[in-house]
Amino acid sequence: MTALIPSHLRYTKEHEWAWLQDGNIVTVGITHHAQQQLGDVVYLELPQIGKTIEKDKIFGTVESVKAVSDLFSPLAGEVVAVNEALVNCPEDINQDPYEKAWMIKICIQQLKQLDELMDSEAYAQYLSECIK
Amino acid sequence: MKRTPLYDCHIRLGAQMTDFGGFEMPVRYSGDKIEHMAVREKVGLFDVSHMGEILIAGPRAEEDVNHLLTNDASKMRIGQAFYAAMLNHEGKFIDDVVAYKFSSEKFLICVNASNREKDFSWIHENCNYAKDVSDDFAQIAVQGPNAIHLVASLSHKEIGSLKRYYFVEGKLKLDQQSTDAIIARTGYTGEDGFELYVPVEDATLVWETLLNVGAKWGTAACGLAARDTLRLEAGLCLYGNDIDEGTTPLEAGLDFVVKFHKSVPFIGRAALLEQKLHGISKRLCGLEISGKGIARNGYTIHAKTGEQIGVVTSGTLTPYLNRAVALGYVSKAFMSIGTEIDVDIRGRLIAAQITQLPFYRKPAKELL
């Protein structure tokens, strides 16, 4: 299960992950569980660079053969990078949700916000409750 | 939630499960596209044991079936299966079903899982003898161009000459034993294939034998997600999405299963005849989305002037054709093939066109 819930990431109840890298830049994507629930992803819509996004608000949509799902931002901040390659090849979300399928990088103001997200253990616990 | 006799098989195969019609069913095993393609190119297995089966029997069974269903049971041969609508007095769908004619005194009606109780009480009220035998059967669909090789290899009877929409009562060879089976050349995928009705106690062995023996023909276990994209690509209606108690078979484009002139008229005939005389105001149409996006159930359909002219009932990006298609009800004035329209996809109007149904049709020479 650990490979499916990497320990260096933080998680939301909406099944996004966040990774604080350098300084105050956080990379965001969706979890293994999220891609599994969606099935084969066919479209992805992401915001423009420079857009300000709010915590828990929609920043994009991901669409599979089966369903469409909104993407919720784990944190508030400004979009500083967008994975354009992923928009053209959204099936990578199914193949590699934590590396190749990063979606956006956000420059965040308050590092404290990260503490409100679940760590891998809490997310694993949350998932086991969801599946029940 | 209920489970089918094959529940443990799905868990062993690592299927992702979902609630469907009150049953815990496999939504996918390996992936939606892989499973979809397996059925178009090789062969796929589906657990469809959640479907209900209702027996109508007795000396007046044929009259009862003619009374309950829109198709003409008297024109069917013994050993023939037929698709039909079961309507209320307003001519609207209680369900869409497949009926199997064993004799003029015995019919088996296969109904949608979610409608099983409703259907049984309706059938029971409106016929002389009916029995819900759903729990006696497991049902496995074997679909795709290689289905014939796989099922023939297990069948005691010769089934190569079995025509589409015919069935036999036979036996299937399993490891050290054999089991009784109704072997029907029917399906819900737009491919050649079979639906096997087997006793509950032998279901696991039948499933595992089909998977093991079928390995050489590229057999894949397939879930409900693939079943949905396959039926949609083939332009087949799903009860609850495309047809329901608000629509009639004439609106759904299912005129070919409505027989107005038969020995015993069907329930809903008067209402349908009235609709036929006055003409329908909307019809289920095929849509192809030319812009980016997928039309989903409930999205609105608009004329180029902006006026709403219909609603989407099902939609997907079809894995085999790789086209974004949908089914939806469209007002009469806009339903001719080629009409340019828009679909409101989450607040944006995306260009689409009325297109020929089905989206996918197997070349006739490849289908019996």
Image (cartoon, rainbow, N blue to C red):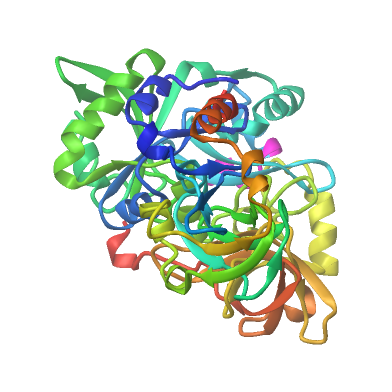
Is residue B109 positioned above or below B326 on the image? above
Number of marks in picture: 0
In this view, which residue lies farthest toward the front?
A: A23
Question: Who is closer to the viewer here, B151 or B3?
Answer: B3
Image quadrant where one finds the N terminus of chain B:
top right
A101 lies left or right of B366 = right
Question: Who is closer to the viewer here, B234 or B57?
Answer: B234
- Who's the residue at 54% across and 66% down the image? A44
Q: Where is residue B134 in the image (x, y as percent from the top left)?
A: 54, 21
Residue B184 seen anywhere in this rendered image of the structure: no
Q: Does the magenta stretch include residue B348?
A: no
Q: Does the magenta stretch include residue B71?
A: yes
- Who's the residue at 63% across and 50% down the image? A111
Q: Position of residue B67 (x, y in %)?
A: 70, 37
Q: In which quarter of the image is residue B69?
A: top right
B247 lies left or right of A91 = right
Q: Where is residue A58 in the image (x, y as percent from the top left)?
A: 70, 59
Image quadrant where one finds the C terminus of chain B:
bottom left
Is residue A26 positioned above or below B212 on the image? below
Question: Who is closer to the viewer here, B224 or B109?
Answer: B224
Q: In which quarter of the image is residue B8?
A: top left
Residue B298 seen anywhere in this rendered image of the structure: yes
B260 lies left or right of B182 = right
Question: Who is closer to the viewer here, B167 or A57?
Answer: A57
Is residue B318 positioned above or below B348 on the image? above
Q: Position of residue A43 (x, y in %)?
A: 52, 66
| Range of residues picked out in magenta | B67-76
